[in-house]
């Protein structure tokens, strides 16, 4: 079993330039042994570049990187990818379609007497036992995903890197495959880092998440911490749904559509963040009109224009107010977050 007190990845101040773009700025992270860690952020924020630095495909301009006890980059050192003992699962799986499952898995293993035994072991671990002799092009997307995972795990990497591993899967398959991948990674005891722009994926699969924005890590935390207590407006906006009001604070207070709230004393401009599920229909609450409705089956979002002029989205149950438009009164379930707003 992995020792959770061991640090598997320690990145300190990694910066990487691609052409004229500063793709990653001052990346500092610690990932514990056995953790499934996600790097989450919008397209172009530097996720893939971060992963490529960990794998050894990109050389950082500055900073240093350790994998377990070994320094692999920084201080004039650059250990090549093949000597880092890192496994990768790519977005397109990069399998050989006409080779069998077992041949694909064996491909990355050195020729040795226990090679076949190791292939059988990972075939079993990944639930591919009945498919070992099938050609990869005869498999479903989810099965191919497991082959890619099995191939990456076969050489017993000390770190597994997954780059948008679910993006080629049908949405109806994704949730199941995600759960399977998490289970396999945990069973193998391998530390894994997953890169994704899909917030639901990161929240549902990861032990901890690093949220990246424009080349920087803005917050690291558990899925619950990142969702419930985002530290930046970008994190609040990107992860989950939120009503965000950019307002001016005065003397440590801000006037919001739901009354006055305390603001950070030094902040002039703030963002008030209210998740749609933190509002509820409440007799005696703030009055308004329902102006639109989005129905999702398991719940729905009501668009409400309050009498004070503000617009707000409220998440309610699927059976609530099926009639749609009309008067409504709303109250808060919890105190909204007030974050310092940043100049873009
Ligand atoms: P995506 O989710 O779209 O894959 P990402 O978060 O993985 O995005 P990166 O691929 O790491 O982002 O790219 C980070 C930044 O570097 C982006 O602004 C991108 O345009 C830029 N970039 C990527 N590759 C190159 C390159 N070869 N030359 C110059 N700039 C590049």
Image (cartoon, grey):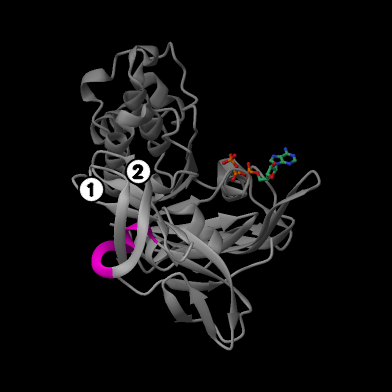
Q: What is the residue that sits farthest to the right in this orientation? A: 20
Quadrant of the image containing the C terminus: bottom right
The stretch drawn in magenta includes residue 281? yes
Q: Residue at position x 34%, y 21% from top?
A: 102
- Magenta residues span 275-284
- Give left or right: position of 50 versus 157: right
The percent position of residue 47, horizontal first and vertical second, equals: 57, 48
> Is residue 230 in view?
no
Q: Which residue occupies the foreground of this view, 290 or 19?
A: 290
Q: Residue at position x 57%, y 87% from top?
A: 265
Quadrant of the image containing the N terminus: bottom left
> Is residue 281 in view?
yes
Number of residue marks: 2
Write down the residue under mark 1. 321
Callouts 1 and 2 close, C-beta under 8 Å = yes
- Give left or right: position of 24 versus 255: right
Write down the residue under mark 2. 293
Ligand 1 quadrant? top right
The percent position of residue 189, horizontal first and vertical second, equals: 31, 51
Q: What is the residue that sits farthest to the left in this orientation? A: 319
In the image, residue 200 above or below residue 271: above
The percent position of residue 253, horizontal first and vertical second, equals: 52, 84
Q: Which residue occupies the foreground of this view, 332 or 185?
A: 332
Q: Residue at position x 22%, y 24% from top?
A: 129
The percent position of residue 337, horizontal first and vertical second, equals: 44, 72
For the stretch drawn in magenta, the main secondary structure is strand
Q: Residue at position x 44%, y 28% from top?
A: 168
Mark 1, secondary structure of its residue: loop
On whether ligand 1 comes within 8 Å of the CB at mark 2, the answer is: no
């Amino acid at each position: 079993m992995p020792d959770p007190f061991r640090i598997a990845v320690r990145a300190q101040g990694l910066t990487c330039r691609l052409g004229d773009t500063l793709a990653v700025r001052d990346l500092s992270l610690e990932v514990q042994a056995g953790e499934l860690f996600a790097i989450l952020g919008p397209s172009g924020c530097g996720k893939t570049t971060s992963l490529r630095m960990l794998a050894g495909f990109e050389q950082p301009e500055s900073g240093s990187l350790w994998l377990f006890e070994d320094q692999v980059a920084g201080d004039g050192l650059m250990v090549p990818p093949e000597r880092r003992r890192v496994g990768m699962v790519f977005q397109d799986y990069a399998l050989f379609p006409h080779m069998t499952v077992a041949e694909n898995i064996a491909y990355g293993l050195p020729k040795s007497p226990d090679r076949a035994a190791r292939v059988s072991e990972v075939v079993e671990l990944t639930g591919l036992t009945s498919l070992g002799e099938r050609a990869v092009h005869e498999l479903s997307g989810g099965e191919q995903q497991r082959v890619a995972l099995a191939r990456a795990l076969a050489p017993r990497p000390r770190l597994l890197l997954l780059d948008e591993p679910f993006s080629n899967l049908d949405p109806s398959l994704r949730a199941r495959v995600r759960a399977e991948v998490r289970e396999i990674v945990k069973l193998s005891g391998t530390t894994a880092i997953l890169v994704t722009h899909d917030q639901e994926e990161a929240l549902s699969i990861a032990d901890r998440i690093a949220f990246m924005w424009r080349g920087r890590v803005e917050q690291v935390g558990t899925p619950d911490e990142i969702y419930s207590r985002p530290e930046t407006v970008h994190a609040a906006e990107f992860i989950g749904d939120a009503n965000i009001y950019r307002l001016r604070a005065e003397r440590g207070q801000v006037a919001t559509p739901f009354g006055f709230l305390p603001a950070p004393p030094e902040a002039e401009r703030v963002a008030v963040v209210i998740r749609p599920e933190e509002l509820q229909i409440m007799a005696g609450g703030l009055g308004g009109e329902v102006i639109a409705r989005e129905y999702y089956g398991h719940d729905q979002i009501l668009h409400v224009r309050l009498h004070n002029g503000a617009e707000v989205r409220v998440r309610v149950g699927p059976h609530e107010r099926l009639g749609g438009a009309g008067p409504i009164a709303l109250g808060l379930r919890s105190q909204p977050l007030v974050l310092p707003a940043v100049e873009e």
